[in-house]
Amino acid sequence: MTISSSLNAGVAGLNANATRLATISDNIANSGTFGYKRASAEFESMVITGQRGAGVYSAGGVRASTARLIDERGALVGTANALDIAISGRGMLPVIQSVDIGIDGDQPMMMTRTGAFRPDAEGVLRTDSGLVLLGWPANADGTIPTNARDTVGALRPVVVNANQQAGDPTTVMSLGVNLPATQTAAGANGTPLPLSVEYFGNLGTSESLDVTFTPTVPATGSSNTWTMEIRDSAQNNAVIGNYTLVFDDTRGAGGTLASVTVNSGGAYNAATGTLSLTVAGGPMTVTIGQTGDPNGLTQLSDSFSPTAISKDGSPVGSLTGVEVDENGYLTATYDTGFIRRIYQIPLVDVPNPNGLLSLNNQTFQVSPQSGSFFLWDAGDGPTGSIVGFAREGSTTDVAAELTALIQTQRAYSSNAKVIQTVDEMLQETTNIKR
């Protein structure tokens, strides 16, 4: 019985070390695989004994259990592709296989730590191995809608079309204009001063706000008063605002706005120094300055000059590039300088990453041991940040694996020697009868 148990223990030792050898060989083979998580083999003893002091001992042997150390993180390696994505910290990218696109109901989501994503013929971001990146689509204004965090129902394959075009309508404008003080003095000619400022409509068309400043010329002295009329070219030059502007002539605030009176059109907000106009495409906020503000409309000297005119928006432009930031926002850049947020890439987290089910291509799926997943904004909760232009390297330490390889080889040889010794002892037992 004791000799037979020794033989069984030796065989168990061979099997256990063969399992460990398999994990080592897998780790070394994937030492250059991006996103690879090394496998580990742990040995557990099996004890089979009789009563204490019985004078006999039966060898139980050993058995090996393997685990994938998914929570270990590899070093980040910089690349030249903006859509090479890695994670600095905890969390995983949501992906699906390209063959699963279009499946009704919840998509069979998988997770990965890194990926080299590029648009395919349809613009879908995917890796060479067929992993498609998932994200939440942004609204037309770049905001991300509120989505459930415990389901993949709102996630969609990320699509970036190279021939995509987009425009950015103007919603905010700032007018910094100096009006000549001499034109509101007695004896001035009272000639209206025109100013045309371009803006962009909802369809990317070029329109203009035509502003006319008409001075009030008094019989004596200076009125320091102007009438500002604003017309919208997109509404057949209809008047959308008429205002009376009075400028300060005191020593401390000379040349700045003293008061703004609304004759018609959008209201003036004295706290922010803005006009609320309505152009053909919708509301527009135009800043003319608060009272006493030297950065808005001014009346100084004898020159009429736009000093600082700015606005948002842009004409229709073609897509030139896409990048992802640390919060997971995928941003498209157009050749007109327009930048728009088009997707948000969440990070998937589970209570026990090492309990995830390991699949091909460095992907993982939820299992009963891992716990349920939750979709976080990158950088929130326990998750780290998303890094573009980077890949996560393998967690294999080749030097450590080679050292373990030597130990495994010696242990395997020793177990083989045990089997050889048991065989010789059984042979001696057989020879007793002779």
Image: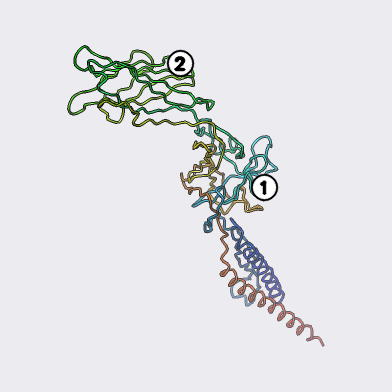
Is 315 or 340 nearer to us in this picture?
315
From the image, tell me which residue sits under label 2: 237
The x, y position of residue 37, in whole percent, is 59, 58
Residue 272 visible within the image: no
| Position in image of residue 238 (x %, y %) | 44, 14
In this view, the mark in front (2 or 1)? 2
Image coordinates for residue 277, horizontal then vertical, percent: 41, 20
| Contact flag, marks 2 and 1 (Cβ < 8 Å) | no
**Residue named by callout 1:** 130
Does 428 sit above or below residue 68? below
Q: Secondary structure at mark 2?
A: loop
Question: Judging from the image, what secondary structure is the residue with disc 1 in?
Answer: loop
Question: What residue sits 52% from the left and 56% below the top?
Answer: 76
Badge 1, how many Cα within 10 Å: few under 14, some, many 20+?
some
Q: Mark 2 or mark 1: name the one nearer the start of the chain.
A: 1
Q: In the rendered image of this protein, does residue 312 appear above or below residue 217?
A: below
Furthest residue toward right: 434
| Residue at position x 40%, y 25% in the image | 285
Q: Nearer the viewer, residue 124 or 105?
A: 124
Residue at 49% in and 19% down? 234
Residue 214 placement: quadrant: top left
Amino acid at circle 1: Gly
As drawn, the residue found furthest toward the left would be 251
| Residue 187 visible in the shown view | yes
Near-viewer residue (309 or 283) = 309
